[in-house]
Image (cartoon, rainbow, N blue to C red):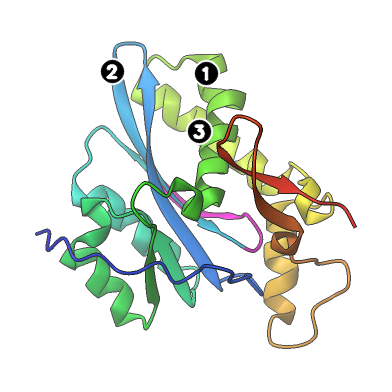
Amino acid sequence: MFDNYRYPYLLKNVVPQHPQHIWGIDITYIRLMGGWLYLVAVIDWYSLYVVSWELDQSMEQPFVMRAVESALSKGVPVSWNSDQGSHFTSDLYTKRLEMEGIKISMDGRRRAIDNIFSERLWRSLKYEDIYLKEYRSPREARTGIENSFRFYNEARPHQSLDYKTPLEIYKISLKVKDTERPSEVHSHLKQLCLTKSKNGLNTWVQFKR
């Protein structure tokens, strides 16, 4: 099932111009009281909108493909980024994206920062929901994560989005992506710069004009 073909990272210095320009996909672990779950999510890099997600007790390939199909039912991005994990180098996954004419991009080795938006999403979810609630069962976790993603998409303003929600930016920008973009929709990535923190680790900081 896995052919282990690695695609190059295509997105260095690329700034997303509109929703469905670049999507990222990633998997993380969710600890339960007595076990683990696996969560996969697809995020739109321009609007930070969580396009789709799936939760499962196993890491079998269908778990990832359900999230892929759910996302593709809502649109087709120009580029799709992931890490080099076996789920994302599988023939099933890559052929499906190629069928839609999508450019496949993969993080460099040990380059989690190449998929920084997924990493930030996991950090927000875990510190604002998972670690606080300590879910006891898969059902409880699914309900909680669903509510958390709904709040994140629809109700939580983001500073990098001019204090709009991901859903607002996603919908507004989809309507105008082939015309002049509205002045209130900024490319938040242009405000981001990779720098070195005091402890030597790569971090992202936001510069103000």
Earlier sequence position, callout 3 versus callout 1: 1
Circle 1 residue? 131
Q: Could you say where residue 86 lies in the image, as x and y percent from the top left?
A: 21, 52
- Taking the image as shown, residue 172 lies to the left or right of residue 33, namely right
Q: Quadrant of residue 84?
A: bottom left
For badge 1, the amino acid type reads Tyr
Earlier sequence position, callout 2 versus callout 1: 2
Circle 2 residue? 35
Residue at far left of view:
1
Gap between marks 2 and 3, in whole Å? 16 Å
Q: Residue at x 37, y 83 (%)?
A: 101
For badge 2, the amino acid type reads Gly
Residue 1 drawn in magenta:
no
> How dense is the environment of label 3, judged by Cα within 10 Å: few (below 14), some, or many (20 and up)?
many
- Mark in the foreground, 2 or 3: 2
Q: Locate the N terminus and report the quarter of the image it occupies.
A: bottom left
Circle 3 residue? 145
Q: Residue at x 55, y 33 (%)?
A: 123
For badge 3, the amino acid type reads Ile
- Mark in the foreground, 3 or 1: 1
Q: Over which residues does the magenta segment extend? A: 46-53
Q: Residue at x 87, y 52 (%)?
A: 208
Q: Count the numbered circles shown.
A: 3
Residue 47 drawn in magenta:
yes
Residue at far top of view:
33
Q: Could you say where residue 18 lies in the image, as x and y percent from the top left?
A: 65, 73
